[in-house]
Amino acid sequence: MMGKEVNVGVIGGGLMGREVASAFGRWFVINDSNVMPRLRAVADLNPDALEWFRQVPGVDLLTSDYNELLDDGGIDVVYVAVPHNLHAQIYLDVLAAGKDLLAEKPFGIDLAAARQIASAGEASGRFVRCSSEFPFFPGAQRVVNAAQSGELGRILEVRAGFHHSSDLDPDKAANWKRQSATCGDIGVMGDLGMHVCHVPFRLGWFPKSVYAQLQRGYAERPGGSCDTWDNALLHTWVECGQEEDVPMRLEMKRMAPGETDSWFIEVLGTDGGARFNTKQPRTLWLFSRGTEQQWQRVDLGFSTPFKTITGGIFEPGFPDILMQMWAAFLVEREGELDGRFGCVTPTEAIASQRLFAAALQSQEKNKAVELNWT
Ligand SMILES: NC(=O)c1ccc[n+]([C@@H]2O[C@H](COP(=O)([O-])OP(=O)(O)OC[C@H]3O[C@@H](n4cnc5c(N)ncnc54)[C@H](O)[C@@H]3O)[C@@H](O)[C@H]2O)c1
């Protein structure tokens, strides 16, 4: 069903920029979004990156100067996927041009940048959200529902994480994600942390304190030296609306043996529990306490938040949930989210940067650091 057309421009046509072209190219898969995004313009400094978009129907502006894209009065929404050191300047320019913004994580290279972007967004009145697609897996949504149901009893423990093995290979070349100047001092937390915080923060679980264990990867790689944190374990205490605070462990790793791209969340209570890992994209694990201890494996299929033509028995993957995230962004922009799960807000993005800044302090002092959210 054709919906309202929304013209989108992409700044940064790398890994993520190309995924947008793919998501919009088969938008007819979604039945109930009421919007029809069109990729109209792409800006990238790299001519090869731009060249790739020549095959994408409907793209009528390819430019190395993103200001040219921003000057195009026909563009409604801009998605920016560039290295972290460029976030603040480009996001501010997008807002100053009067466009709505789907930003990439970590929403600026550090806390100060995130605050600056959020303030500019608020002052501009534009619609601003940040990308984080994994919670749009049906299994992740079911964990959210279970956590909100009140049926888990006293919540005992929360664990959320994102594990990659991208840095295990010492022969992999150095790139901007492995250097603090371009990735940020928060390293892997900036790379993977927003994905991990999205669901806990949406559930209202903001850490009252954090004790961080950070580990670096290889200092030298082909093509240059690397200095970023590669693995982060954040041991936190959260308030979950009950008398006792709850331990919540957030894990972000680029050196996790055996894991190519595993996003997971687990909430355990005295009466019930729920667990989902993208390693098994169709599988939800539910715990219930009875006369016998029992984990039940539920075969979920394709029950995505926005309904699709895809048969309910099939398993969802990364391109599917990226579409779901875009649908949530575009539909919320129209004011029609109607209680469905939304993209990361600027407030949540700042909260994640506050947590990561505290984690850096914790690592330095080898002590827990308190966070005050009032
Ligand atoms: N949501 C996700 O799952 C996900 C996954 C990977 C990366 N990301 C985020 O996306 C962003 C980009 O990461 P990536 O992996 O796509 O990086 P990438 O290196 O593959 O692509 C970045 C692109 O930006 C271009 N670029 C650099 N400076 C530019 C400028 N001034 N104007 C226009 N283009 C410019 C580069 O030429 C490159 O093509 C980062 O913020 C990263 O954290 C998100």
Image (cartoon, rainbow, N blue to C red):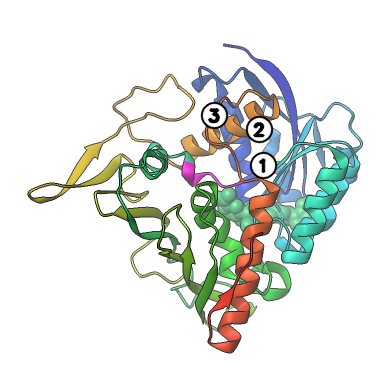
Residue 43 visible, this angle: yes
Quadrant occupied by the N terminus:
top right
Label 1: element kind: helix
Identify the mark at residue 55; answer none if there is no mark: 2
Mark 2 and mark 3 residues within 8 Å of each other at the beta carbon: no
In the figure, 86 relative to 227: above or below?
Answer: above
Three-letter residue code for mark 3: Gly
Three-letter residue code for mark 1: Trp
Identify the mark at residue 52; answer none if there is no mark: 1
Q: Is residue 114 magenta-colored?
A: no
Which residue in the protein does label 3 denote?
339
Q: Is residue 310 left or right of residue 335?
A: left
- Mark 2 vs mark 3, CA separation in Å: 37 Å
Q: Find residue 209 and report its horizontal and vertical position in percent.
A: 54, 71
**Where ligand 1 lies, by quadrant?**
bottom right
95 or 225: nearer the viewer: 95
Residue depicted at x 60% and y 86%: 364
Residues in magenta?
Answer: 131-135
Residue extending farthest bottom: 365
Q: Find residue 326 and report its horizontal and vertical position in percent.
A: 60, 34
Identify the mark at residue 243; answer none if there is no mark: none
Mark 2 and mark 1 residues within 8 Å of each other at the beta carbon: yes
Residue extending farthest top: 1
Q: Quadrant of residue 357?
A: bottom right
